[in-house]
Amino acid sequence: MLRVAEIAYTKGWHQLTTDTWAYLSPPGTWGFSNCGLVVSGDTALLVDTQFDLPMTRQMQDAIAARMPGVRVTTVVTTHANGDHCWGNQLFPQAEIIASSASAHGMAHEVQPAQLEALSGPASGDSALGHYMRRHFGHFDFTGITVMPPGRTFSNRLQLSVEDTAVELIEVGPAHTDGDVIVHVPGAGVVYTGDILFVGDHPIMWTGPVENWIMACDTIIATGARYIVPGHGPVTHLDGVREFRAYLQMVADHAAHAHAAGVPYWQAASQLALPTPYVDWGHPERLVITMAAAYQNLGDASGDLMDVLAHAAELEQSLASRVRGSKLRG
């Protein structure tokens, strides 16, 4: 795992430079996302909020404790997934900004009440039901009102936080339809949203993977010193290069498997992972990524619940193999 040694991967706010901060949420798995803060004087721009209201309030309290008197006047939503925007309502005085595609996605995403039902006690005794309860059942989705952006843009948008320049760059569709990265050029910092995962397999909901690879190239071209991923520890440009190589490997495997008529869920389980990717968490997410890659190759890969069911079954299968290996050992 390529991480910046001086930035500990512990929960809470970590100062990167004079004006930039990263809010880290270990272990970084499903729903535990990172945020960013750009501060100038008593004004701040917040990059993303948390998955539920209690988590977002905890982040707000941490801002008040570490940076008393600082007001969040702008919230940038990097993409439409709930773990990056379902706390937006707790910043009623801030201007919320997102790409036009993300604004559309927020209205058509799985909504909080639906996710609560899918991960609650009534979610069923199937592999999918167990998967959803295990990974999402500990979040509190009550009381959430999905807050769309009040301001949208396409391509690029230049902002300033008092004296600090901030550039929003739309790089989607990739992870989702409307992914945005946040570049603070004077600080050498990029907040990537879910264009970058560190330590776990990513999820590609839409693709195409070629766009995602180009998004990595955009990050690399900034020459930034600190790269704050959507999930996982703060990394540097070599971490982005490692992730880019992973995406290229997945794209090549998807193309070959699709041409050979291999179903997407089998293609995911058949991918031989080299170092360093063999130790990444959540390998079952490859099912979701392969399904999106197949769709971009012209294959109708089934609906979301079918895809998630195959991912849950792969996780169950991999866990059984590990248990069997330990028993044999």
Image (cartoon, grey):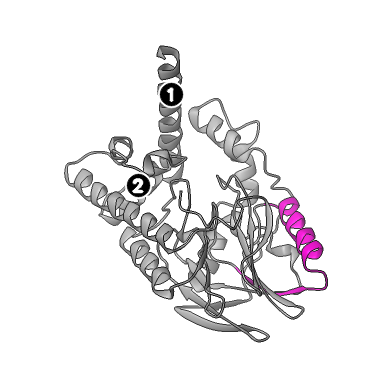
Secondary structure state at the residue bearing disc 2: helix
Quarter-of-image position of residue 302: top left
Residue at position x 65%, y 47% in the image: 113
Q: Position of residue 144 (x, y in %)?
A: 71, 55
Say which amino acid is labelled 1. Answer: Val
Say which amino acid is labelled 2. Answer: Ala
Residue at position x 71%, y 45% in the image: 140
For this orientation, the residue located farthest to the bottom is 163
In the image, residue 68 lies in the stretch drawn in magenta: yes
Q: Which residues are magenta?
A: 52-76
Q: Sequence-wise, which precedes: disc 2 or disc 1?
A: 2
Q: Position of residue 232 (x, y in %)?
A: 54, 51
Secondary structure state at the residue bearing disc 1: helix
The answer to whether residue 39 is left or right of residue 76 is: right
Q: Judge by depth and name the residue closer to the eye, 15 or 252.
A: 15
> How many numbered discs?
2
Q: Up-down: is 111 above or below 89?
A: above
Residue at position x 77%, y 78% in the image: 42
Residue 33, which numbered label?
none
Quarter-of-image position of residue 218: bottom left
- The residue that mark 1 highlights is 322
The answer to whether residue 327 is left or right of residue 267 is: right
In the image, residue 319 lies in the stretch drawn in magenta: no
For this orientation, the residue located farthest to the front is 6
- The residue that mark 2 highlights is 291
Dot in front, 2 or 1: 1
Q: Position of residue 301 (x, y in %)?
A: 33, 46
- Packing grade of label 2 (10 A; few <14, some 14-19, many >=20) is many
Instruction: Decide if residue 143 is in sight here.
Output: no
Find the distance from the CA under tag 2 to the CA under tag 1. 25 Å
Q: Position of residue 292 (x, y in %)?
A: 36, 51
- Packing grade of label 1 (10 A; few <14, some 14-19, many >=20) is few
